[in-house]
Amino acid sequence: MKKHLFFILFIVLGTIPIAACSSSVKMKDKLVQLDYLLQHKKDYDKKKEDKIGLCRRQLSMAKTENAQYAACTKLYNEYKSYKYDSAYFYANRSLQIAEKLSNRNYQVEASCDLVFCLLSAGLYKEAFDTAGEININDVSESYKIQYYYLCARLNYSIGDYNHALPYQITYFNNGDLYTDSLLALTPPKSPAWWYAVGQRQMKEYNYKASIRSFLEMLKFKQISLNDRAIATSCIGWMYWRYVKK
């Protein structure tokens, strides 16, 4: 649940321009809003657990393997930023069902979910090993996009973790290659396109351009709360880098 609290923090504070930070009134209003949200943590926990409970009931009532796969995927998505072990369990169960169905699209999706779990846990070797086994030949375009997005994020993340040269540069360059493949399949100036561009610009230390890209992404009202949290946290981090310098 700590990740959810950090997401709330960045959504409330992350998009405040540096100039606005000098206004004590505006900052005070934001901190009051943040205090209110933190005070209601138990309410958010309950809503999350209620939603998970509903997904579990759907899984228990699923009659077909396709319905079971859909329910397991829902449970994975509910758990992925909440509880690592549960997310990994349902991602692995989804993969088992996908293999029973011999559904290549599902296999790629579930494998990507496993990689995300490993990446989130800092298990980079295991994440790379699992990603290396994914075969995206003859799968639908949307699943290729998911694969390229994940591989770009994996390489960028380990590049951030490993600052040793020349290895960091190699990881960032690999991330750029996957981003190129991702952008080739993504509608220009869509939320996913702006995210991919902003992520690459951030790794190139082009923070001004990256902030503009993430702000363009945030203009879309239909993006998920999770995506909005990621974008605002990136913006907040880059503003912090400016202030730090």
Image: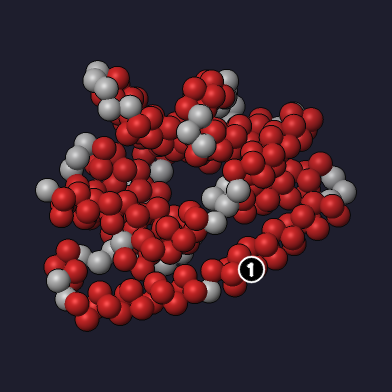
Q: Nearer the viewer, residue 245 or 61?
A: 245
Residue 116 in percent (x, y) is at 53, 37
What residue is rendered at 59% in x and 69% in y? 42
Quadrant of residue 227 within the rendered picture: bottom left
Residue 78 percent location from the top left of the image = 62, 54
User: What's the residue type where badge 1 is placed?
Assistant: Lys
Direction from residue 219 to residue 238 in the image, left or right = left
Other residues around mark 1 within 10 Å, as few (<14) / some (14–19) / many (≥20): few
**Residue name at image x 32 percent, y 51 percent:** 234
Question: What is the quadrant of residue 89 in the picture?
Answer: top right
| Residue drawn at 32 percent across, 34 percent down | 160
In this view, 63 is above or below 138: below
**Does 211 sit left or right of 182 as displayed?**
left
Q: Is residue 20 among what the camera can see?
A: yes
Q: Closest to the observer: 113 or 34?
A: 34
Q: For this view, does 1 lie left or right of residue 153?
A: right
Q: Position of residue 107 (x, y in %)?
A: 66, 32
Residue tagged 1: 47
Local SS, label 1: helix
Q: Residue at x 86, y 54 (%)?
A: 61
Q: Is residue 216 visible?
A: no
Locate the N terminus and report the quarter of the image it occupies: bottom right
Q: Position of residue 36 (x, y in %)?
A: 44, 77
